Amino acid sequence: MPRSTRSIEMKTLCLDCGMDTTPCTQSRGCRHTGRWEMYMVYHRVWQAAGMGKGFLCIGCLERRLGRRVVPEDFTKAPINRHASWETERLASRKRPASP
């Protein structure tokens, strides 16, 4: 059976604003640097935002919570480790505040 040449498209659109939280061109050498907002927060934070399944960009999560997200909101999941593909907005929420 011949293999399909069609690529699989991964879409993780923010449920509120429609932003693609994991944009990718699907082409060789695709550069994701500074463009992703993929993260995991604790269940209590997700529930407080009125979420079950789906995705939210950090801005829409904060709008729903009525506050800025802080490092303590993020789980210890590997997806929350610093990576070059995350937006500065997401990275700044994961960093402890400067004294």
Image (cartoon, rainbow, N blue to C red):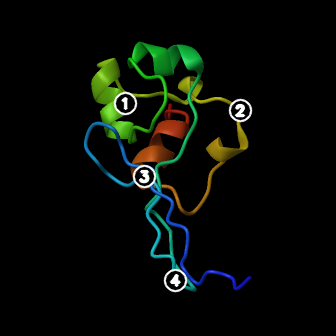
Mark 2 and mark 1 in contact? Answer it, CB < 8 Å. no
**Of the residues tagged 2 and 3, which is closer to the observer?**
3
Residue 55 x %, y %: 44, 39
Secondary structure beneath dot 4 equals loop
Residue 27: assigned label: 4
Residue 99 x %, y %: 50, 31
**Of the residues tagged 1 and 4, which is closer to the observer?**
4
Q: Earlier in the sequence, mark 3 or mark 1?
A: 3
Which residue does the image show at 45% across and 56% down from the upper left? 11
Mark 3: amino acid? Thr
Relative to 46, does residue 38 appear above or below in the rendering? below
Residue 48 x %, y %: 42, 13
Circle 3 residue: 21
40 and 51: which is toward the camera:
51
Secondary structure beneath dot 1 equals helix
Circle 2 residue: 76
Mark 2: amino acid? Lys
Circle 1 residue: 61
Which residue does the image show at 47% across and 38% down from the upper left? 93
